[in-house]
Image (cartoon, helix red, strand yellow):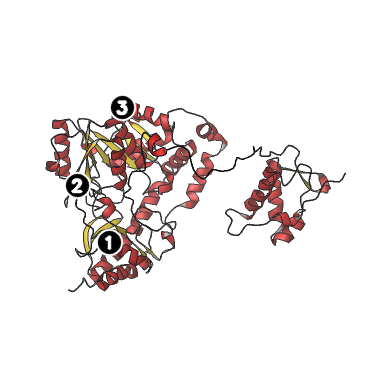
Amino acid sequence: MPAMAISPDSIFLEAGGAGTLQARIKRQVVGHILSGQFRPGERLPSSRALASHLGISRITVTIAYADLVADDYIEARGRSGYYVSASAAQEQSLPLPQSRAESNVDWAKVLAHRASVPSQTILRPADWRSYRHPFIYGQTDPKLFDHKNWRLCAMQALGQRDFFSLASDVYTEDDPLLIDYIRRHILTRRGVNAPADTILITMGAQNALWLTAQLLLSQRRRAVMENPGYPGLREILGATRCHLQVVDVDQDGLPPEALPDAVDVVYTTVSHHCPTGVTMPLDRRRRLLDLAAERGFVIVEDDYEFELSFDKRPSPSLKSLDAGGSVIHVGSFSKSLFPGLRLGYLVAPAPFIREARALRATVLRHPPGVTQRTAAYFLSLGHYTSQINRIKAAYTRRRTAMDRAIEAVGLTVAGRGGSSLWMAAPDNIDTEMLAERLYARGVVIEPGRPFYDPHGPVLRNRYRLAYSSIPSVRIPEGISRIADEIARSGLIGT
């Protein structure tokens, strides 16, 4: 009995599909085989017929078929054509029960802990990239990223030479190449001399902060964070049920003299305070360390954006000044590479790192090996330094454009540092309402309310303007629209 022929009409290129034409053809054929629509022994359309049907080059179809043959989904039979392989994998699905609209479990009573506490999420549209003037913090400009060399490093990491580095279960260990680069190049820029056993790779700074909170805090312990401060940290600390106290920052960041007498852990952003951007002076850093030694508390230093210092050389990190082992240093590649990388690190005394490594293993043994090795190659081959230099040059131009545009329209800067400006609108402006109105004008700003302690007074006229995701040529018009929208409220010149 002749094999049944599959019609070319069964294969199509989905509109807006991701990947190359070959990948999209392959995805279609594999999907039909796995679902049982294409069965073993059935003959596929010829490459000429399918190319004509799809309106593409015949060689494109030929390459897609060759890939499918290599993966044993189809087989070539001489001049007879291509057929679904007899050994092609097929999904084995059990009958699905009818879905229930309601659960019989009262989850409000069953849950011992709730992670979904009321969130202080920074407000922004999900499609903010489609806006013409996105003053959004911490996002990557694809025009500034070195796609070519990152791709080459990823290919090198996926090569046969590195197969065991990415494919093996190394239990709780991290990539030695990445650790070595962080130790000898990243940390030395911060004045930190750290042996390998004092460094732990994390899934970004958020994961690093969570590890510190889990190990250092409990219901009986006390923590301090800055106000305003990073909303994600507030949620982490709230989940520990510790006694949390906020300390208001000033023009130089966290004031040591304002710390309570009884405190176990102090969280601070000294390089660029979140969100005001101010840098803590050296004498204040030393005073904070003196208090830690006197009172016996631990300092967690979130050292994000230290690479992006435009006005002066970076100050020594708290960790570099720490003679008593009181500082846990948190670093991340989210701002210098891209946030989706989810790669950061902890630097702390070896006893703490041992416990952090063990805790990390209860959730994930280690960040993916291929991610670590790709980053290690990108850093060690010099691409990272080139990337930083390119970003700093672009951000310097954008900062200049921001300063000129802001001065031209009379907006007020309340703080600056890194890749953003902390702004003050007139006192009776609610920047959440302002942000909503600006959406209609293609402008996205970040209202300040989520950064403040929800149980205390909030300066609702504060907002953040970042320039990592907006080209220089669009900055003046965006700033002008912000000023114009504030003026429409009748609050400028009155």
User: Which quadrant would the N terminus be assigned to in this image?
Assistant: top right
Q: Could you tell me the amino acid type at mark 3?
A: Ala
Residue 431's tag is: 1
Residue 327's tag is: none
Q: Nearer the viewer, residue 163 or 96?
A: 96
Mark 1 is surrounded, within 10 Å at the Cα level, by few (under 14), some (14 to 19) or many (20 or more) other residues, namely many
Of the residues under marks 1 and 3, which one precedes in the sequence?
A: 3
Of the residues under marks 1 and 2, which one precedes in the sequence?
A: 2
> In the image, what residue occupies the spot 66% across and 37% down?
92
Q: Marks 1 and 3, how far apart in space?
A: 45 Å
Q: Marks 1 and 2, how far apart in space?
A: 27 Å
> In the image, what residue occupies the spot 54% across and 39% down?
158
Q: Could you tell me the amino acid type at mark 1?
A: Thr
Q: Could you tell me the amino acid type at mark 2?
A: Met
Query: In the rendered image, which residue does mark 2 sit on?
Result: 280
Of the residues under marks 3 and 2, which one precedes in the sequence?
A: 2
- Residue 326: x, y in percent? 22, 32
Q: Is residue 5 visible?
A: yes
Q: Nearer the viewer, residue 290 or 381?
A: 290
Describe residue 110's horizontal placement relative to residue 279 as left or right: right
Mark 3 is surrounded, within 10 Å at the Cα level, by few (under 14), some (14 to 19) or many (20 or more) other residues, namely some
Foreground: disc 1 or disc 2: 1
Query: In the rendered image, which residue does mark 3 sit on?
Result: 350
- Residue 446: x, y in percent? 31, 58
Q: Residue 239 lies in what quarter of the image?
A: top left
